[in-house]
Image: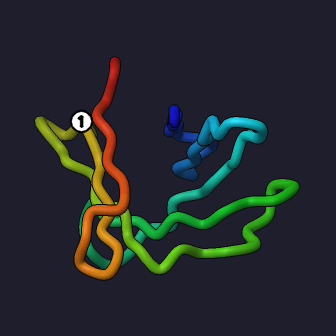
Amino acid sequence: MKLAIVNAKGALRGIMDVPGEAMEMEYLPTSTPHRFMPAFLKDGKIFDVEVAPVDFRMVDGRAVGFSAMFEGKPWMEGTRKN
């Protein structure tokens, strides 16, 4: 899968290219630095929030990748391409 994460007017948004359908998400900040909860959007509004937080890896103030654990096991991860 391909996931593009962008800053959309101050909100961290993601577009996941899933075969047959693209999914749009918003990453909701938590009290832990660089940790967000992924929320799925439909018609631009949140309809579901995942239980697995996404942790962004930072280098010199820039996100270089992310990972998410679910029930103590790796669920998804990604590395910045540009």
Relative horizontal placement of residue 65, taking residue 54 as reference (left or right): left
Front-lying residue, 78 or 38: 78
Is disc 1 placed on a helix, strand or loop?
A: strand
Q: Residue at 57% across / 45% down in the picture?
A: 14
Q: Residue furthest left?
A: 60
> Can you identify the residue that label 1 sits on?
64
Where is residue 1 drawn, in percent x and y? Answer: 51, 36
Relative horizontal placement of residue 68, taking residue 13 as reference (left or right): left
Q: Quadrant of residue 46?
A: bottom right
Q: Quadrant of residue 60?
A: top left
Front-lying residue, 64 or 78: 78
Residue 10 to residue 53: above or below: above
Residue type indicated by callout 1: Val
Label 1 neighbourhood size at 10 Å, few (<14), some (14-19), many (20+)? some
Front-lying residue, 47 or 19: 19
Relative horizontal placement of residue 17, taking residue 74 as reference (left or right): right
Where is residue 75 drawn, in percent x and y? Answer: 35, 62
Q: Residue at 34% across / 18% down in the picture?
A: 82
Where is residue 35 drawn, in percent x and y? Answer: 32, 65
